[in-house]
Amino acid sequence: MRVLCLNGPNLNRLGKRERDAYGTFTLAELETELAQFAAEQKIELTCRQSNHEGELIDWIHQAGDDGLDGIVLNAGAYTHTSVAIRDAIAAVPVPVVEVHISNVYKREEFRRHSYIAPVAAGQITGFGKDVYKLGLHALLLRNQGG
Ligand code: DQA
């Protein structure tokens, strides 16, 4: 299985930003741990992060063209604003698992709406950095037809 883990805006600030909401781990630590888990599961994983909407969209299109088996996507604040990212997901046949480190339903009202959820395979929110592993796991089960 080939999977892309995509992180959106401000997630490069993990460990420094709003630690009460997002914990103290850095993006590099998260990606290292995830890469280890992926290797154990025989998943070929690529991790990318961008603060730019268009770049995220280009990578989603690329994942479609490359025939990847899934994307684990934390679109950050673009989740709540971006019709363009939603349309990019709808434009490729790759299943997307939407993930959020914090429980977006426990927070401000504006975080409760996701443009991505209606075009995602599913959503995992609120389990800290484990949401990324849970996202990979969901893709594995889906790939096995479970
Ligand atoms: C987030 C939740 C979003 O509302 C927020 O804008 C983020 C991170 C999360 O992982 O909990 O940047 O996606």
Image: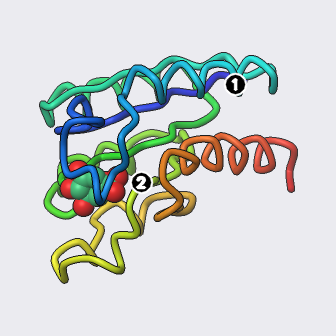
Mark 2 CB near ligand 1 (8 Å cut): yes
Q: Nearer the viewer, residue 97 or 145?
A: 97
The crowd level at tag 2 (other Cα within 10 Å; few <14, some 14-19, many 20+) is some
Q: Residue drawn at (29%, 46%), measured in percent from left and top?
A: 75
Residue 86 in view: no
**Which quadrant of the figure contains the N terminus?**
top right
Local crowd at mark 1 within 10 Å, few (<14), some, or many (≥20)?
A: many
Circle 2 SS class:
loop
On the image, which quarter does residue 36 sit in?
top right
* Residue 143 picture location, percent across and down: 78, 42
Q: Is residue 53 above or below residue 19?
A: above
> What amino acid is at disc 1?
Ala
Q: Is residue 17 above or below residue 106?
A: above
Relative height, residue 62 to residue 22 (above, below): above
Residue at 70 percent of width and 51 percent of height: 138
- All told, the count of numbered labels is 2
Asked if 18 appears above or below 136 in the picture, the reply is below
Specify whether 130 is left or right of 57: right
Q: From the viewer's perspective, tell me whether residue 47 is left or right of residue 21.
A: right
What's the amino acid at mark 2? Answer: Ile
| Residue under label 2 | 101
Which SS class for mark 1?
helix
| Comes first in the chain, label 2 or label 1 | 1
- The picture quadrant for ligand 1 comes to bottom left
Relative to the observer, which residue lies in front, 109 or 93?
109
Q: Quadrant of the C terminus?
A: bottom right
Q: Position of residue 15 (x, y in %)?
A: 29, 35
The residue sitting at 46% across, 53% down in the picture is 99
Residue at x 23% of width, y 72% of height: 111
Would you name the residue on which mark 1 appears? 38
Alpha-carbon distance for marks 2 and 1?
18 Å
